[in-house]
Image (tube, rainbow, N blue to C red):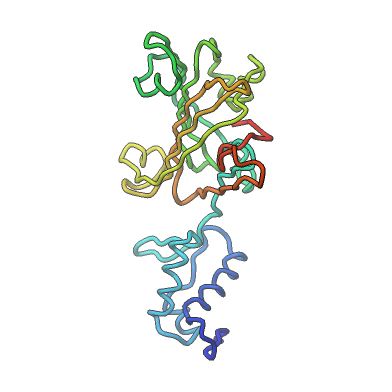
């Protein structure tokens, strides 16, 4: 039975969209969504009207489509928050998933000139490169590469980094972890190599982030490059309150600095 109001000025597809969003809240992730044909019959409208509603749901991340199979309920987006220094582990856990980091590489190397410039280290000084794949309930959602100054952190143990968060390892061994950072985000598309790592298709949307992380003394100690699946993350920005205008929206000092 139709639950939309034809006497109002609100377009029918927006009314349908609103009803469908309320239904999605009670459906399971990856559950098959009703077909356009069935929804058109239910709401007593044309398939074109239903399609408008579905397209908006797809664009806003509520559902996704697989050609030849149908429309499905999207998993909840992981919020990349700004209430503190964003942590993949904490962000994923807040959504009820189990986060796991798999170390693909850890070692000392001479970095590219661009990394040397960002970290303000001499050409001859090696830095730590730590590359990890982060999963949520076993699904790869982010590829993260950290560059750390070796003069601040002279030794790192691969097993400790595997079993603990990177910042937890730094805190236990050195008592010095980044306390604030400046993050930037931009939309990109996945290369063939990245798509393979994150279980995507080449050309799928990803979020690319760069971080400059500082000790509480103001010393820059880490540069991070992160690629996040565009279908699994959203970025939440908290603007500074009055009197805090000197702190950036996504670089505010954290309450929790684990990552």
> Looking at this rendering, what residue extends furthest in the front direction?
243
**Residue 205 image point, x, y percent:** 38, 49
Location of the N terminus (image quadrant): bottom right
Relative horizontal placement of residue 249, taking residue 175 as reference (left or right): left
**Residue 81 image point, x, y percent:** 59, 44
* Nearest to the observer: residue 23 or residue 167: 167
* Nearest to the observer: residue 26 or residue 174: 174
* Nearest to the observer: residue 221 or residue 66: 221
Above or below, 40 relative to 63 = below
The part of the image, by quadrant, that contains residue 253 is top right
Name which residue lies at 36% across and 38% down: 194
Relative horizontal placement of residue 240, taking residue 121 as reference (left or right): right
* Count of marks overlaid on the render: 0
Name which residue lies at 50% across and 58% down: 74
Above or below, 110 relative to 205 = above
> Looking at this rendering, what residue extends furthest in the bottom direction?
7
* Nearest to the observer: residue 242 or residue 182: 242
**Residue 41 image point, x, y percent:** 46, 84
Location of the C terminus (image quadrant): top right
**Residue 158 image point, x, y percent:** 53, 18
The part of the image, by quadrant, that contains residue 164 is top right
Name which residue lies at 36% across and 24% down: 114
Above or below, 115 relative to 90 = above
């Amino acid at each position: 039975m139709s639950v939309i109001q034809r006497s109002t000025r609100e377009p029918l597809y927006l009314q349908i969209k609103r009803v469908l969003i309320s239904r999605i809240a009670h459906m399971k992730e990856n559950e098959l969504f009703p077909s356009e044909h069935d929804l058109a019959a239910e709401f007593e409208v044309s398939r074109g009207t239903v399609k408008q509603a579905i397209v908006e749901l797809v664009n806003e991340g509520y559902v996704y489509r697989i050609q030849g199979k149908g429309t499905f309920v999207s998993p909840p987006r992981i919020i990349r928050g700004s209430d503190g220094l964003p942590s993949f582990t904490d962000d994923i856990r807040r959504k009820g998933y189990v986060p796991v980091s798999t170390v693909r590489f850890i070692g000392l190397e001479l970095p590219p000139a661009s990394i040397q410039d960002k970290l303000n280290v001499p050409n001859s000084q090696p830095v730590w490169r730590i590359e990890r794949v982060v999963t949520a309930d076993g699904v790869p959602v982010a590829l993260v590469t950290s560059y750390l100054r070796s003069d601040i952190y002279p030794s790192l143990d691969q097993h400790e980094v595997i079993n603990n968060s990177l910042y937890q390892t730094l805190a236990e061994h050195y008592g010095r972890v980044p306390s604030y950072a400046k993050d930037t985000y931009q939309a990109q598309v996945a290369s063939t190599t990245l798509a393979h790592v994150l279980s995507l298709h080449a050309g799928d949307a990803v979020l690319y982030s760069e971080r400059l992380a500082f000790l509480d003394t103001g010393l820059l100690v880490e540069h991070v490059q992160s690629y996040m699946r565009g279908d699994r993350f959203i970025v939440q920005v908290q603007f500074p309150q009055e009197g805090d205008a000197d702190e950036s929206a996504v670089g505010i000092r954290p309450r929790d600095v684990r990552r």
